Image (cartoon, rainbow, N blue to C red):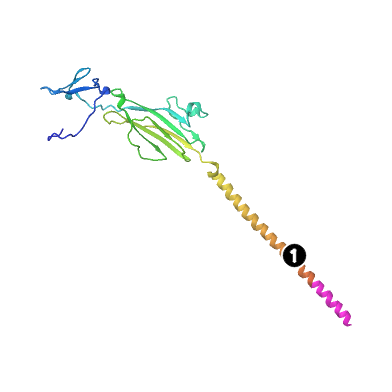
Amino acid sequence: LDAERNIKEVVHFGRAEGFVGIETCQNAALKDANGDLWFGTINGLTKYNPKGTRNNLIAPLVRITNVQLGFEDLRNTKYQKWASPKGGILDGLKLPWNENEIAFAFQGINLSNPEKVSYQWKLEGLHDDWRGQTTRNFASFTNLSHGKYTFVVRAYNEDNVTSKEPVKASFIIEAPFWQTWWFRLAALALLFFGIGFFIKNRIAKIERKVKREKEKLELEKHLLSLEQKALQLQMN
């Protein structure tokens, strides 16, 4: 409370913090002359010394415990050689464009209060911002487009102290063949070849037509010449 007895901060105590009373009795709360707090519970009397409260400044450790490709553990797939014995991913994992569903399981280690560990994660290459803090220790991604990705996760203890070093796992999803440079180059070459073939075929067709027209004109000229000669003979 502040000086005016307004609530500034609320801290919750449960079994993880050592409060095993579960259910308190009505009006069974007392602050004695030493500043200790007493609570009557269905399991007996509980004493809490506020002066003995210390923040947990030890950052939790975090590690990736498992990676799933589709709905199967990475270590049981044909990419098992990239599965780390510790549960993460070794460098160099490349996945085809149609195997683009991946999930990560992770665990934070906080000996003082294991139940109050929370997490933040992000997938660099998809979004560079940290997702909201959550107690869920599982993240999945579907329909990823081709590119390079790095999954990053960090853990927080009950006093919001975060991991000194987040854990990372990188992988690459390859582009489908129709989006690769060699396919585009081949398609461009085929397009130019098709255009060239069409133009060449069109020119050849026009040349054949001109040749036929020329032959027709020469024939007509020859026939006209013969007619003139016949007419001259008749006149003679």
Residue 125: % across, % down: 42, 40
In this picture, residue 99 sits left or right of residue 36: right
Q: Which kind of residue does numbered mark 1 sit on?
A: Arg
Say which of 138 and 20 sits in front: 20
Q: Is residue 207 above or below residue 20?
A: below
Q: Report the residue at 56% width, 45% height from top.
A: 183
Residue 126 horizontal/vertical position (percent): 41, 40
Q: In the image, what residue occupies the spot 70% across and 62% down? A: 207
Q: Is residue 125 left or right of residue 18?
A: right
Report the residue that reaches farthest toward the left. Answer: 33
Where is 232 relative to 59, above or below? below
Which portion, as a residue range, is magenta? Answer: 221-236
Q: How many tags in the picture?
A: 1
- Along the line of sight, the residue nearer the viewer: 116 or 24: 24
The local crowd at label 1, few if under 14, some if 14 to 19, many if 20 or more residues have their Cα within 10 Å, is few
* Percent coordinates x, y for residue 2 in the rendering: 14, 34
Residue 14, quarter of picture: top left
232 part of magenta stretch = yes
Q: Is residue 112 left or right of residue 86?
A: left
Q: Quadrant of the C terminus?
A: bottom right
Percent x, y of residue 174: 50, 39
Instruction: Say which residue label 1 marks.
Output: 212
